[in-house]
Amino acid sequence: MTSVTRRPTTRSVSRSRTVFECTSCGTPHPAWVGRCGTCGEWNVLEEVPVVGPEASIRTAFDEVVHLRSLTDIESTNWVAEPTGLTEADRALGGGLVPGSVTLISGEPGIGKSTLTLQLAAERVRSGGRVLLVSAEESAAQVRLRAERLKAVYKDLWLVDSGSVDAVIDRVEDLKPDLVVVDSIQTVQVNDERGLPGSIGQVRAAAQRLVTEAKARSLATVLVGHLTKEGSLAGPKALEHLVDTVVELTGDRHQALRVLRVVKHRFGPTDEIGLFEMAEDGLRSVDDPSRLFLDDRAADVAGSVVLPTLEGHRPLLVEIQALVVRATMPHPRRSPQGLDGRRLALLLAVLDRRVGISLGALDVYATVVGGASATEPAADLPLALAVVSGVTGRPVGGGVSNPRVDDTVALGEVGLGGELRQVVGTERRLREAVRLGYSRAVVPAGTVTAVEGVELIRVGNLAEAAAAVGLLSAN
Ligand code: TYD
Ligand code: MG
């Protein structure tokens, strides 16, 4: 091992300077202004000293830094411990790693407190001790939720203080296996400037909890609220501090909740967990394709099934389109769970390349069941659903005699109306076969063959519409 002593190369600056930092988003300003230009908040600037070259030189002076080859560093085996919630384990790549910090972010009311209380309860059921820091809700409210979730246990301990020091003292007393902080925005650090919930406070509190988690090998879950703007002094500002970031999303009026891993130091990202919000909490959805297709009516115009990919996971979803005469001078385009710009583009391609004009028609398009399909593969089924909606004919007939209830479609549509292949065709087709679909409309170049599914290869949108009996082939 080689030792190197680092010497300062810049001269120290002795003049102390200050800047005006936004307590809401952290942006520094050279002078005081009434409104932060970055986040738009009023009266949020605070004068703070600049930590300049002087400070950094002093700490770096004579500091001994070791050079180490990567081969000399011992490999660590991170072992994830199952949470007891199958879909959470699936998303997290096995469970929670001791000593790791996981941030669960989501909009208010989406189910973060429910999910974290269920994680806590599962941990207690498997013989662990959990500390729940409930800085946002009263102990009585937590007890009520726990009763609803059948999660009232002795070893589920509560602190309803927002002071990070108090929390760490209680961790010391209790020595829990899991700490849940709900929410990080309501926890305060006594010596830090700014109001609770401001960027400085949230970061400092999270940093303290991260240090504690590492030192004690303690699995820690932080809840972070996302505001409408998504910026806030919260999840975004914390992503670099924590090991894992998961988002809980969904439509509040629908039962489906998607847990998506967006950053993961110990496993794959791009995995999702699917839950259904029920009377007694979040329930894992083991067979989502079936859930989305169960109530599907056969022989309805404007409906096409897409085998989509959510992360690595194939899912069958139904795309529907309803096309009606426009009542306003500007026709409506209303996409739900779909990409609005893709819808507009597809309508233009249908007009120009297929000769179907939608200028005087309102188009409503949706993915059934609160699911979403914003990937390129959704182009073809969406366009076919629109054509089916315009013609009033369900997918059926055509060259291979496909029926609405046995056919899926996937493919990206180009501006020329041509079809392009998409990733993961094999996985998608296998899922389609598993659920009893036997035909797939796919781009002409598709070579993947999957037993049990007949491929209807088409070069462009007009051919695709003809192949499923929506237009006559010319
Ligand atoms: P909550 O976990 O409080 O959301 P967050 O912490 O993200 O703000 O839950 C929000 C909603 O979930 C609430 O409107 C009620 C509903 N809910 C159920 O439907 N079933 C349940 O068992 C529970 C606990 C909540
Ligand atoms: Mg909550």
Image: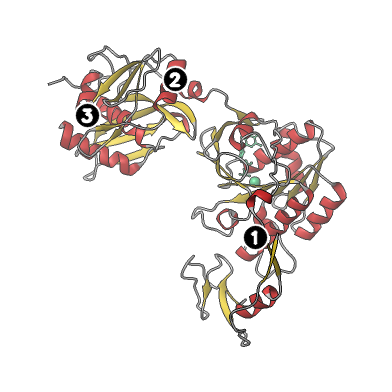
Up the image or down, 4 lies above or below 364; here it is below
Q: In this view, does 57 lie above or below 98?
A: below
Q: Residue at x 64, y 75 (%)?
A: 56
- Quarter of the image for residue 391 reads top left
- Residue, x 48% and y 23% (percent of image)? 289
Q: Which amino acid does label 2 sit on?
A: Arg
Q: How far apart are marks 2 and 1 (CA)?
A: 46 Å
Image quarter (top left, top right, bottom left or bottom right) of the N terminus: bottom right
Judging by the rendered image, the residue that carries numbered circle 1 is 202
In the shown orientation, is residue 386 left or right of residue 111? left
Q: Position of residue 87 (x, y in %)?
A: 61, 31
Q: Is mark 1 on a helix, strand or loop?
A: helix
| Quadrant observed for ligand 1 in the rendered image | top right
Q: Is mark 2 on a helix, strand or loop?
A: helix
Seen at 82% across and 33% down, the residue is 127
- Residue 356 showing in the rendered view: no
x, y (%) of residue 293? 45, 21
Amino acid type at image mark 1: Val
Q: Give the structural element (helix, strand or loop) at label 3.
A: loop
Residue depicted at 64% across the width and 61% down the height: 203
In the rendered image, which residue does mark 2 sit on? 430
Looking at the image, the residue that sits furthest to the left is 474
Task: Write down the quadrant of residue 187 in the picture.
Answer: bottom right
Can you give x and y, in whole percent of width and height, for residue 19 in the image? 56, 78
Q: Mark 3 points at which residue?
A: 460
Residues at marks 1 and 3, CA–CA distance in whole angstroms: 52 Å
